[in-house]
Amino acid sequence: MRYKIVIDSCGELLDEWKNDERFESVPLTLMVGAEQIIDDETFNQADFLKKVAACPECPKSACPSPERYMRAYDCEAEHIYAVTLSSELSGSYNSALLGRNLVLEDHPEKKIHVFNSRSASIGQSLIGMKIQECEEAGMSFEDVVETVEHYIEGQHTFFVLENLDTLRKNGRLSKVKALVASALKIKPVMGSTDEGSICQLDQARGMNRAMIKMVEQVIEKTPDSADKTLAISHCNCPARAQVLKEAFEERMKLAKIIVLDTAGVSSMYANDGGVIVAV
């Protein structure tokens, strides 16, 4: 096996990756109240969203241990890559890096690189696709790392949420602001900074207007889009994702558009009805 790509479970796996030994999802643990939920193939989105809605506490996540990453790196692949949730949002990157360093102590010949996505969700998926593209083109390990790190620097992530409860509960939006926004049906258009933290880009009254503003933000920040793949992930709202897809097809030249449902960690942040775009 020439390569293996390890993605923490905030990143959505493409269907064709799920039964491919070259890809592995390393699960985070989700906590809703006192209950712990492993974000793996057993994750039930509908059940999870009900539990989050019923719980007054903010849902939380715990990153995988360095030992879990070490198990993922324990393979015969010549080149091993990990793609983690932004280091500004989670300890997953540091954990993956520590796991790498521990492996290299005993096996210094192994080639392992950990990518800080500076993104989340579908942004991680796009990075995995870029690694696969480079590997399938026969690039050296060092060239793959350089090419993908450059790709990450130019990537942007955007999202609009129907439900602001998680942002309010985890302190990213004040209770007063969240209540005012909910009363006026104001939806913030959020995005990623260059460092991988979250910022507000715009806002609009109503979900449809907010999605239009998000499309405008994507177009503005994506020059020379004809060779790029755009990705959309949605939390329990396929019709909304389809509307977005059609809007991008109409207004942008793109090489490809992919649409995926959010996995566990992304569902926690996006909440019911949230949509995420990365390009």
Image (tube, rainbow, N blue to C red):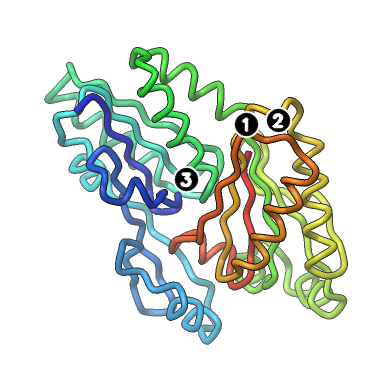
To which residue does mark 3 refer?
A: 85
Q: Does 41 sit left or right of 265 as displayed?
A: left
Residue at 43% x, 80% y is 47
Which of pointers 3 and 1 lies earlier in the amino acid sequence? Answer: 3
Distance, label 3 to label 2, CA atoms, is 24 Å
- Amino acid at the residue labelled 2: Ser
Q: Nearer the viewer, residue 176 or 242?
A: 242
- Give residue 189's position: percent from left, percent from top: 76, 55
Which of pointers 3 and 2 lies earlier in the amino acid sequence? Answer: 3
SS at badge 1: loop
Distance, label 3 to label 1, CA atoms, is 21 Å
- Give residue 64's position: percent from left, percent from top: 32, 51
Q: Nearer the viewer, residue 173 or 263?
A: 263
Residue at 73% x, 47% y is 248
* Vertical relation: 177 (above or below) 254: below
- Amino acid at the residue labelled 1: Lys
Distance, label 1 to label 2, CA atoms, is 5 Å
Residue at the extreme bottom of the image, as rendered = 54
Q: Does 11 sit left or right of 95 as displayed?
A: right
To which residue does mark 1 refer?
A: 228
In which quadrant of the rendered view does residue 61 lie? bottom left
- Give residue 178's position: percent from left, percent from top: 76, 72
In this rendering, which labeled residue sits more in front, label 3 or label 1? 1
* Vertical relation: 184 (above or below) 194: below
SS at badge 3: loop
Q: Are marks 1 and 2 in contact (CB under 8 Å)?
A: yes
Q: Nearer the viewer, residue 151 or 239?
A: 239
In this rendering, which labeled residue sits more in front, label 3 or label 2? 2
On residue 225, the disc is 2
- Amino acid at the residue labelled 3: Leu
* Vertical relation: 277 (above or below) 96: below
On residue 5, the disc is none
